[in-house]
Amino acid sequence: MASPEDQLATMLANIPEKTGKTLDQWIALIRASGLEKHGEIMKLLKGEHGVGHGFANLIVSKSRETGEEIDLVAAQYSGAKAGLRPLYEEIVTFAQSLGGDVEIAPKKASVSLRRKKQFALVTPATKTRIDLGLALKGDEPQGRLENYNAMCSHRVRLESADDFDAEVKGWMKEAYSRAG
């Protein structure tokens, strides 16, 4: 049985044959339509272009990924939180140095760092602090490493690049290694 990743790759490869257009052509068509909501775009693809439900859903999902990451991160680090952007960039750069399999997944209020599963969560918590969530389940909180939530068992509060030191990087590297 093919893995979900293999199934997705097969569907992506089959878009031109099954729908008559490449993914890039569909994305251009969606952008030109001016539609933004998932359901509206699905209706356009299925109703006006005869795309099947599964391929329409995949195309809409992929169209929403393109460029959205930049907007989400920019929104998180705008206004009063703009001064935290260099610290965010330093955290992400370090995470990417841990291995080529690091996935950066921005959400509305935070950015997940994943391998096979999430190992860290970067959240601009206040105008002066980033909360770095780390998946270190089973480890006892110690010093700056506090209990956090279900998704990331621990958190470190970072207010400057100096706070993102060798100790925090060591915890992040450990969380990365456990997520593989």
Image (tube, rainbow, N blue to C red):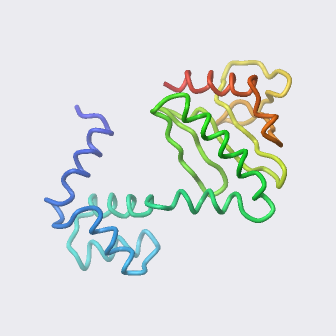
Q: Is residue 101 left or right of residue 121?
A: left
As rendered, which of 84 and 46 lies closer to the eye?
84
Q: Quadrant of residue 45?
A: bottom left
Location of residue 112 in the rendering, given as x and y in whole percent from the top left corner: 59, 43
As rendered, which of 100 and 17 lies closer to the eye?
100
Q: Which residue is drawn at the image coordinates 73% and 30% (left, top)?
A: 154
The image shows residue 54, relative to residue 162, as above or below, that is below
Q: Quadrant of residue 156?
A: top right
Q: Which residue is drawn at the image coordinates 78% and 58% (left, top)?
A: 81
Q: Is residue 146 left or right of residue 177?
A: right
Position of the N terminus, as image quadrant, is: top left
Location of residue 126 in the rendering, given as x and y in whole percent from the top left corner: 82, 52
Q: Which residue is drawn at the image coordinates 55% and 31% (left, top)?
A: 97
Location of residue 92 in the rendering, given as x and y in whole percent from the top left corner: 61, 41
Location of residue 84 in the rendering, given as x and y in whole percent from the top left corner: 76, 51
The image shows residue 145, relative to residue 17, as above or below, that is above
Q: Is residue 70 left or right of residue 54?
A: right
In the displayed image of the protein, which residue is found farthest to the top? 139
Number of numbered discs visible in the structure rendering: 0
Q: Which residue is drawn at the image coordinates 48% and 61% (left, top)?
A: 67
